[in-house]
Amino acid sequence: MSGEFGGKVAVVTGGSLGIGRAVVERLAAGGAAVVFCGLDEESVRAAETQLRDKEHDVTGVVADVTDAAQMNGLVGLAVERHGGLDTVVTCAGIQRYGTVEDTTEELWDEVLGVNLKGVFLVCRAAVPELRRRRGGTIVTMSSVQAFASQDRVAAYTASKSAINGLTRAMALDHAADGIRANVVCPGSVDTPMLRWAADLFRGDTSQDDQVAEWGRAHPLGRVARAEEVAELVAFLAGPRSSFITGAEHRVDGGLLARNPAALPEV
Ligand code: NAD
């Protein structure tokens, strides 16, 4: 029961890799019992084993965020095992590339299905349980692309902007239930997703060089570590942020602070 999240129960989607994996570890290290899902058995089992080896109370489940029954089951498992639910963090997400012109309906549905409907489904399952405990928190994972888009990410950037809107809506609708909802908007973060993207675009350079180049676009000169995003999530999930709800929080190394129309050298 000790620690910032002692006695608390959390559900984390996309908790087997990347940002979600760091969130699971951060909440569990703070004393929470965490039930998380991922899409593939191998990464779920690996994360569960590694975190249990550190004596964290974690349960990993293979579940698809686009499936309502599986999201009901994920929340149900947390409640059955730990007696209730205090926090939901939605980290499951995918990146795909394309303009509106060359985005197929299948790709659009895939991206919006995982990134947006996936948030809706797990939050819909969780709200009655969060209401029961009062003081519940929802933290959604968006992106700087909710504010400033790259080229050729039409579906992804649409999904991320919509997550920000959905989070505001949940914050308003459930404030009277004592539930707070906030959205986190990272810049580039060193995760399997970023490494996959680096491989797509690196050309003749190495994966590390491509990641470093993206890092140089951030005023702090590097991409984030997943743990740096998890720290903000922990703040928003816990009692230290008790008067913060319906808000967008950037963790982007200053990326969006810069106007890219540079002054000429003098
Ligand atoms: P990642 O690919 O490294 O990990 C994604 C996780 O989501 C994995 O656990 C995977 O199993 C899970 N997942 C994917 N599809 C799923 C599905 N249908 N059902 C259940 N789980 C599923 O990704 P990441 O880089 O850690 O990204 C996490 C979130 O942060 C995403 O929403 C992403 O858009 C966002 N984000 C990432 C970056 C970045 O640079 N890495 C930047 C901004 C925002």
Image (cartoon, grey):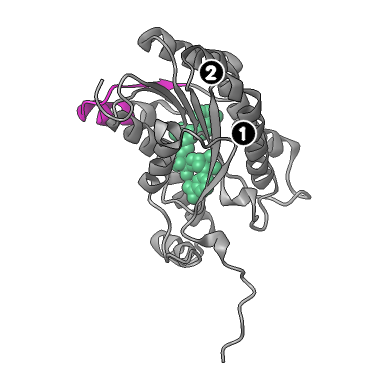
How far from the left and from the top, in percent, is residue 52?
A: 25, 25
Q: Which mark is residue 159?
A: none
Q: Which residue is drawn at 63% across and 28% down?
A: 170
User: Residue 266 appears in which quarter of the rendering?
Assistant: bottom right
Instruction: Let me know if residue 161 is in the magenta part.
Output: no
Q: Between disc 1 and disc 2, whose residue precedes?
A: 2
Q: Is residue 111 left or right of residue 58?
A: right
Badge 2 density bin: few <14, some 14–19, many ≥20, Cα 10 Å:
many
Q: Is residue 153 left or right of residue 21?
A: right
Dot 2: element: helix
Q: Which amino acid does label 2 sit on?
A: Ala
Q: Pointer 2: what residue?
A: 126
How far from the left and from the top, in percent, is residue 115?
A: 60, 35
How far from the left and from the top, in percent, is residue 88?
A: 48, 26
Ligand 1 has an atom within 8 Å of the beta carbon of the residue at disc 2: no
Residue 191 visible: yes
Dot 1: element: helix
Q: Which residue is drawn at 49% across and 35% down?
A: 91
User: Residue 148 appears in which quarter of the rendering?
Assistant: bottom right
Q: Indicate whether 264 appears above or below 190.
A: below
User: Residue 172 appears in which quarter of the rendering?
Assistant: top right
Q: Pointer 1: what residue?
A: 167
Residue 16 visible: no
Magenta segment, which residues?
Answer: 46-62
Q: What residue type is labelled 1?
A: Thr
Q: Residue at x 44, y 17 (%)?
A: 85
